[in-house]
Amino acid sequence: MRKLSLFEIFFLIVILILIIGFGIWVYLLKKPTTGVNCHTKSKWLWNKDCKSFQEKFYDATLKSPAKLKPYLLNFTHASGGGPSIFLPMWYRFRYVNVNTGGYSDFSDWIAAPVISGSCKLPCIKGVGKCEGQIIQGYDSCLFNQPTIGIAESDIAYDFTKALPNGDFVYINLHRYVGESSADATPPPPNAKDEIIGILAAIETIGGKKYYSMIDVLKNPCLSQSCNTPTWCQKQSKC
């Protein structure tokens, strides 16, 4: 076996030192983090989950969305989105100044509860008057992903443009979950709901633009018992 020359030994030592040095440099690098920390990258008053904005005080200067109500824009099944939604989900929204935390009045509740298998979903043209990609009745009994929205033309603020003072106004979407699939009574105005996100994505339906949000991250039937309603126990038509 041939002996290595001094030059070859020196060359191998240099390569080894470089490899070790590179390894140490990589180890000392700041570990990457997933996503963007909205609390350090933005001065806006995001909530802890970075999916909605803080509501700190009632701001009478904000316009009221009263008499408006959100619609169900789509309803489908999402793999990994959890079980069917067999509890009635009610939605409403309000405007929020993302710089101050000031909030407006609430809109009205959505016209009917969103629940898997329902024949009376709150679609754009009215309760039960669903067209296109929204399926009602037994064929929707496995659905777990609703998309909620409001027409851009109905909204008082454009979240892409600042107010004269430089503030921005967005739309927080609130949700209330009923206790039984048989309960179709709207919640009272003072019902304790939760903020689940913002209406910010743009969807175009029938040539009209809507601000929307897909509600798939907080399936209520993941944390509580949801019995299958009678209309999903056997195949039937609306």
Image (cartoon, grey):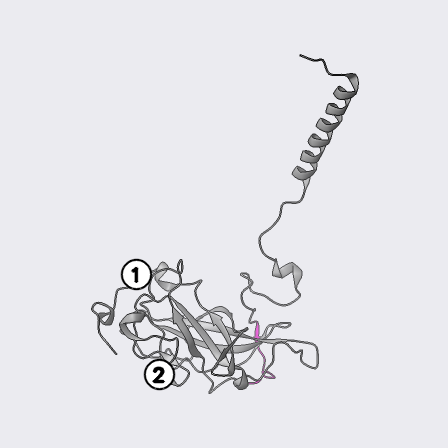
Decide if residue 135 is in sight here: yes
- Taking the view exactly as shown, the residue that stands out farthest to the front is 2
Give the magenta-colored segment's residue range.
56-63
Inspect the image, locate mark 1, and give the three-letter code of the amino acid beneath it.
Answer: Ser
Total numbered circles? 2
Which residue: 21% across, 70% down?
Answer: 235
Magenta-span inclusion, residue 85: no
Inspect the image, locate mark 2, and give the three-letter code of the amino acid beneath it.
Answer: Val
Residue 193, above or below 48: below
Residue 136 quadrant: bottom left
Report the front residue among 184 and 145: 145
> Could you say where residue 206 lies in the image, as x and y percent from the top left?
47, 83
> Could you say where residue 108 lies in the image, as x and y percent from the top left?
44, 83
Q: CA distance from mark 2 to mark 1?
A: 27 Å
Q: Which quadrant is home to the N terminus? A: top right
Residue 225: give its label: 1
Which residue: 73% across, 31% down?
Answer: 18
Which residue: 78% across, 17% down?
Answer: 6
Identify the mark nearer the N-term, 2 or 1.
2
Residue 125, above or below 98: below
Residue 84, above or below 156: above
Report the front residue among 19 and 30: 19
- Indicate which label's residue lies in the foreground, 2 or 1: 2
Residue 75 quadrant: bottom left
- Taking the view exactly as shown, the residue that stands out farthest to the right is 7
> Could you say where residue 67 lies in the image, as x and y percent from the top left?
46, 87
Residue 236 located left or right of residue 104: left
Q: Are marks 2 and 1 in contact (CB under 8 Å)?
A: no
Magenta-span inclusion, residue 57: yes
Q: Label 1 crowding class (10 Å Cα cut-off): few <14, some 14-19, many 20+?
A: few
| Pointer 2 residue | 127
